[in-house]
Amino acid sequence: MTAAEVWAPGARPSRPYTGGVKRVALLGATGSIGRQAIEIVAAHPDLELCAAASGSAPLDDVDAPLKQVGGDLTELLEQAQPDVVLNAVVGFAGIHATLWALEHGVDLALANKESLVAGGELALAALRRGGGRILPVDSEHSALYQCLEGREVDQIHSLVLTGSGGPFRGRTRDELADVNVEQALAHPTWTMGPKITIDSATLANKGLELIEAHFLFGIPYARIDVVLQPTSIVHSLVRFRDGATLAHLGYPDMRVPISYALTYPERASTPLAPLDFSSLTLEFQQPDTGTFPMLALAREAGERGGTAPCVFNAANEVAVAAFLAGRLPFLAVSDVVADALAQTDGAPARDVSDLLEADAAARRLAEQGLSVA
Ligand SMILES: NC(=O)c1ccc[n+]([C@@H]2O[C@H](COP(=O)([O-])OP(=O)(O)OC[C@H]3O[C@@H](n4cnc5c(N)ncnc54)[C@H](OP(=O)(O)O)[C@@H]3O)[C@@H](O)[C@H]2O)c1
């Protein structure tokens, strides 16, 4: 599938939203994205929550007719029949909801990048069958989507994903040997949930985003670059074949891409101040993949294809949970992931049960890796 087929404004969902109030199913309502999404929905008269879900936290203060804590998210979606699913669950746990939305041709506002990274080809096949669309919520992919909109794929030279570099940008490996959880959670520009914040510190997040961009826009890995832009003002760029480069700029605030995805194509107003150019610093640097190997490991997993991205994601989830629990040093996160990747053949998943097995096997390998790290 080409970029145009994924995001072409003309592509109609098989169960199209036909105007009026748009009914949003919010999965991960208690999280960082979930809370900001509730604020966006509350501020917009044409949006309403028809369902909300969390993993284990109570939803008492969430105003939605259908609520579910834990359990099978597809049952909630079947009951709610939403116009749009905002998948803001963290991790591979979001896979079934992503596939449900794609299979049913319901718009998928996707924050849960792990499901597209791990589900890759299966997700795109479900998207083709369902005839719906993915509206990216990740700020970089929302930026790319906006720069790309209306363009033919063959006009694109390359995509450039930007990243802040996280709290440890500029450090050497020696300087990272003893970093603790609190230091790794101190992100310089974004306030996010703990898993993605650690992923930002290791650059695994940029690696996941690289694979996410490949699947979303159908661009080969060799034509997706990553550049660091420490203040997170430039959210990503597209280079076109004629030498022109379009960039998306804005303050680092997830309410903008959430609002864009939920109100697409309306681009509703948000409480954000316009960009003030008198105080901007725009500096670009190359990522240090020697100190932060997760970006190179993700690229390698993406290029291998099959279930290698699923293995990368699963091993990373295990390693990050261990780091957060104080069971693994920061630098060993990439060792656990590299070992898991080296021990798997990455054979393609023919169906969801293959994918679930690949995820489970990678988690077992990573757990074994923890004991030797
Ligand atoms: N935060 C950001 O700024 C940001 C930016 C770009 C992309 N993203 C992506 O958005 C996703 C969410 O990130 P976040 O930072 O919002 O994470 P978070 O703050 O940790 O929130 C995660 C949410 O997922 C829920 N959840 C976990 N497992 C679940 C399950 N099995 N069933 C239903 N709900 C489940 C959690 O519920 P409980 O509270 O009950 O655990 C919580 O509501 C991630 O994929 C992340 O990479 C986030």
Image (spheres, grey):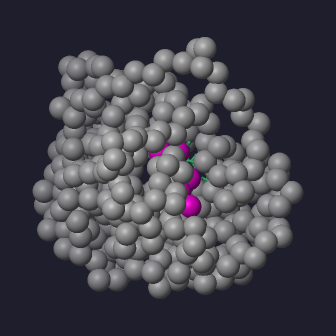
Magenta residue span: 135-142
Task: Judge whether residue 139 is colored magenta.
Answer: yes
Image position, residue 23 (x, y; %): 76, 69
The number of callouts visible is 0
- Residue sitting at 21 percent across and 24 percent down? 173
Pick out the residue farthest to the front.
242
Pick out the residue farthest to the right.
45
- The correct choice, above or below, for 351 with respect to 372 in the image is below
Along the viewing direction, whichever of 151 and 141 lies nearer the viewer = 151
Image position, residue 95 (x, y; %): 47, 69
Is 159 situated left or right of 272 in this image? left
- Residue sitting at 19 percent across and 73 percent down? 347
Quadrant of the rendering where the C terminus is positioned: top left
Task: Judge whether residue 256 is colored magenta.
Answer: no
Image position, residue 311 (x, y; %): 27, 61
Image quadrant assignment for residue 214: bottom left
Image quadrant assignment for residue 14: bottom right
- Residue sitting at 32 percent across and 50 percent down? 241
Image quadrant assignment for residue 15: bottom right
